[in-house]
Amino acid sequence: MRSFTEKQIRTSFVNSTLRERKELVLPPDFAELDWANLDYLGWRDHKIPSLGYVFAEVDDELVGAVLRRSDGVTRGRPQCNWCEDVTLPNDVVFFSAKRAGQAGRNGNTIGTLVCAGFECSANVRVLPPIAYEGFDREAARVQRIEALRLNVYAFVRAVRLGG
């Protein structure tokens, strides 16, 4: 992912109000982010933990979305819809996002199960276990990285396009 400035991030929201954009709290490590190893930028608001933010490049444009964590509890251990990791070291929670435009103003939302702290980029870069003799772990890792990008882009694109 290319690096972006605070201003670019604040202006890229598609499903938020001007007030939400102004009150956005960037991640504490924003200045030290390793953009080269991020497939998207996501974090939880440390002031309001039920809020999350996700940013991805969609059609060469930075698109940001405000997410809200569900209060519900899932039965069993859910799988993240973005990194699809079955050996996650972290929790997975349900987030929803208002769709952009009139659809969002009408209450239309989209939801997904995501790693609670948006650790997906790190998860897909871990070499997977050997599945069988001759298994190409590096090729599997590259495939997981590409699948993550496609999954995040599809979600963010769906938010941007509204209903």
Image (spheres, grey):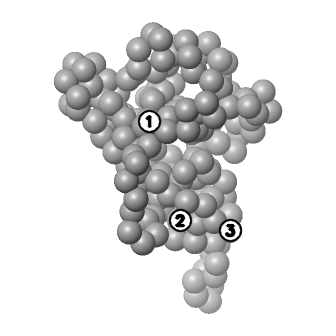
Q: CA distance from mark 1 to mark 2?
A: 21 Å
The single residue placed furthest to the bottom in the displayed view is: 133
Q: CA distance from mark 1 to mark 3?
A: 29 Å
Sequence-first disc among 1 and 2? 1
Residue at image x 57%, y 47%? 118
| Location of residue 39 (image quadrant) | top right
**Nearer the camera: disc 1 or disc 3:** 1
Residue at image x 27%, y 25%? 104
Q: Is residue 74 above or below residue 31?
A: below
Residue at image x 56%, y 16%? 23
Q: Position of residue 51 (x, y in %)?
A: 50, 35
| Location of residue 1 (image quadrant) | top right
Label 3 sits on residue: 127
Label of residue 112 in the image = none
Q: CA distance from mark 2 to mark 3?
A: 11 Å
Label 2 sits on residue: 85
Q: Quadrant of the C terminus?
A: top left
Residue at image x 50%, y 46%? 149
* Residue at disc 3, secondary structure: loop
Label 1 sits on residue: 67
